[in-house]
Amino acid sequence: MKSSADLAKGWFAKAESDLANARTMVSGPGPYDTACFHCQQAVEKYMKAFLAWRGQPFPFTHDLERLARLCEATESSLKLAVPEVVALTDYAVKLRYDNDFWPSRQDVADALAVVEGVRSMIVASVPPLAHP
C-alpha cells in the first residue's frame, strides 16, 4: 500500500501533466474546450494531492468547491473556495456534454491563471510536493 506522501506526489504529478497540456493547447489554435478541461483537472488534482499529503480522505468528485472546503478545513490559511476556482467545475462535465459551450482562448488564459494560483498555494503549504 502506498504512503500518503506517495499518493500525494502521484496526484501532484498528474496535476502537473494537466497543467502542461493546458499550457501547450493555449499557445496553439486549440482545442480550447480540452484545455479548459485540463485546467479543471489540474486544480482538482492539486487539491487531492494536498489532502492526500495531509492524510485526509477525499471524495472522488469533480466538485471543486467541495474539495476546496475540505482543504480549507484542513488548513485554514488556504483560500481555495473562491468564485474563480469554483467556476472551473463546469469545465469537468458541462463543456464535455453541452454542445453550445465553447470556451475561448481568453477563457483558457483566465483558467490557467487560476490553476497557477492554486498550485502556488498548495506548493507554499506543502513544498515537498513540488520536488519529487
Image (cartoon, rainbow, N blue to C red):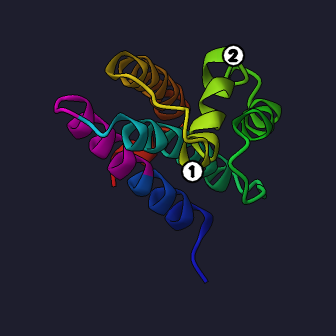
In the picture as drawn, the residue positioned furthest to the front comes out as 100
Q: For this view, does 88 lie left or right of residue 67?
A: left
Quick one: SS at disc 1?
A: helix
In the picture as drawn, the residue positioned furthest to the bottom comes out as 1
Residue picked out by circle 1: 49
SS assignment for the magenta stretch, majority: helix
Question: Please, what is the three-letter code of the amino acid marked with disc 2?
Answer: Pro
Quarter the C terminus occupies: bottom left
**Residue 79 vertical position relative to residue 15 in the rendered view, above or below:** above
Residue 104: within the magenta? no
**Residue 111 vertical position relative to residue 16 in the rendered view, above or below:** above
Q: For this view, does 6 lie left or right of residue 67?
A: left
Which residue is pictured at 76% across the width and 55% down the height?
58
Q: For this view, does 52 lie left or right of residue 96?
A: right
Where is residue 42 shown, x and y percent of the image?
A: 47, 43
The span from disc 1 to disc 2 (Cα, nearest Å) is 21 Å
Where is residue 30 shown, x and y percent of the image?
A: 26, 36
Residue sitting nearer the eye, 112 or 4: 112
Where is residue 89 shown, x and y percent of the image?
A: 65, 36
Which residue is pictured at 46% across the width and 33% down the height?
123
Badge 2 crowding class, 10 Å Cα cut-off, few under 14, some 14 to 19, many 20 or more, is few
Where is residue 63 shown, x and y percent of the image?
A: 73, 42
Which residue is pictured at 54% across the width and 32% down the height?
101
Quick one: SS at disc 2?
A: helix
- Of marks 1 and 2, which one's residue comes earlier in the chain? 1
Q: Which label belongs to residue 83?
A: 2
Residue sitting nearer the eye, 45 or 72: 45
Residue 23: within the magenta? yes
Question: Please, what is the three-letter code of the amino acid marked with disc 1?
Answer: Ala
Which residue is pictured at 77% across the width and 23% down the height?
76
Residue range of the region highlighted in magenta in the rendering: 15-29
